[in-house]
Image (cartoon, rainbow, N blue to C red):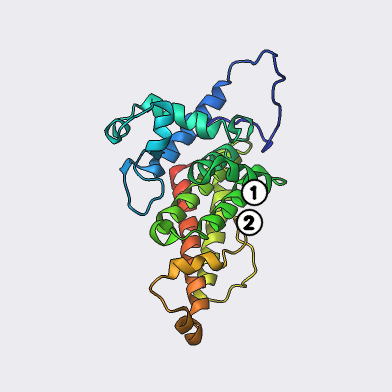
Amino acid sequence: MPASAGMAAARGGAHAPGRFQPPEPPAMRQNFEASLKLTLKHEGEWADHPRDPGGATMKGITLATYRRFVPNATKTALRNIAPAMVARIYRLDYWDKVGADRLATGVDLATFDAGVMSGPGRAKKWLAASLGGADHQTVKMLCGKRLGFVRSLAIWRSFGGGWGKRIAAIEARGVAWALAASLPGHEVKAALADEHRAAQAKARTRAAGSGGTGAATAGGGGDLMLNPGHAEQLAGWSIAALLAAGMLVALVFAVRAVLHRQRAAAYRAEIEAMGDA
């Protein structure tokens, strides 16, 4: 688990032009390396999915991005990209652009991974809209907003299952890191257990179809209602038939139930990883 980068979620603190800038603290480097390791786990290896607008990617790096660092690079060169270059690209294009070195432990991970998946600009907006509470609450809020956004995309139908698991895993890990920055292990574990139980309860409620349509998720991003963009996700279904049969609402709750089960599973994994703490 990375060392604490401080309790405040965002601390401007930019150095004035021309002034001496001290070396990057070891904790910051450790946070970047640990965050990158987790992000790369979700990005995977080589992919060239026809429905992915990014095209060919290796460890989440597109050919277009790689060519900004290595002009005229080929797909073969991208497929054999060196680990040091991978780290350099992620550091410059995402970690630095979201200002992760100025963020608290856990918040840095959540913002960085959101930036990788949806762009640094969106990640910073989600972060700004999530500030105001404890660091672990900021993580949950940001991940909730992030999940709401990706569910609005037409390609959710192709990638939604993996995206939901990824965001749940980042939320749980970010919350764990944020709590560990100020609490002893046994209290962190107890807090994670509370999150696990809450996610399970939400999953059961949504599965039963009895949840309120306007409630907020534990992640704070609204309760993930369908919006017009979700019509693409239901390709092959007759919306009129679903409405006539009263099935659309049931489908919405079913999707929510799956997402909360993914969150519960992610928190359970964090608890198990702590062992006897």
Q: Is residue 275 visible?
A: no
Q: Residue furthest bottom?
A: 244
The answer to whether residue 204 is above or below residue 53 is below
What's the amino acid at mark 2? Answer: Gly
Q: Position of residue 74 (x, y in %)?
A: 30, 32
- In terms of depth relative to the viewer, which is nearer, 93 or 184? 93
The picture quadrant where one finds residue 20 is top right
Q: Position of residue 225 (x, y in %)?
A: 57, 67
Badge 2 marks a residue whose secondary structure is loop
- In terms of depth relative to the viewer, which is nearer, 188 or 12? 12
Asked if residue 202 lies left or right of residue 54, the reply is right
Q: Position of residue 220 (x, y in %)?
A: 63, 56
Q: Label 1 crowding class (10 Å Cα cut-off): few <14, some 14-19, many 20+? A: many
Nearer the viewer's eye, disc 1 or disc 2?
2
At a point 71% along the width and 27% down the height, the residue shown is 13
The picture quadrant where one finds residue 27 is top right
What's the amino acid at mark 1? Answer: Gln
Q: Which residue is mark 1?
A: 137
Residues at circles 1 and 2 in contact by the CB criterion of under 8 Å: yes
Q: Which residue is mark 2?
A: 220
- In terms of depth relative to the viewer, which is nearer, 276 or 236? 236
> In terms of sequence position, does the residue under pointer 1 or pointer 2 come before the other?
1
Q: Position of residue 203 (x, y in %)?
A: 51, 66
The answer to whether residue 135 is above or below residue 230 is above
Badge 1 marks a residue whose secondary structure is helix
Q: Is residue 98 visible?
A: yes
The answer to whether residue 55 is above or below residue 200 is above
**Distance CA(mark 1)–CA(mark 2):** 8 Å
The disc at residue 276 is: none
Q: Label 2 crowding class (10 Å Cα cut-off): few <14, some 14-19, many 20+? A: some
At a point 47% along the width and 78% down the height, the residue shown is 239
Asked if residue 116 lies left or right of residue 16, the reply is left
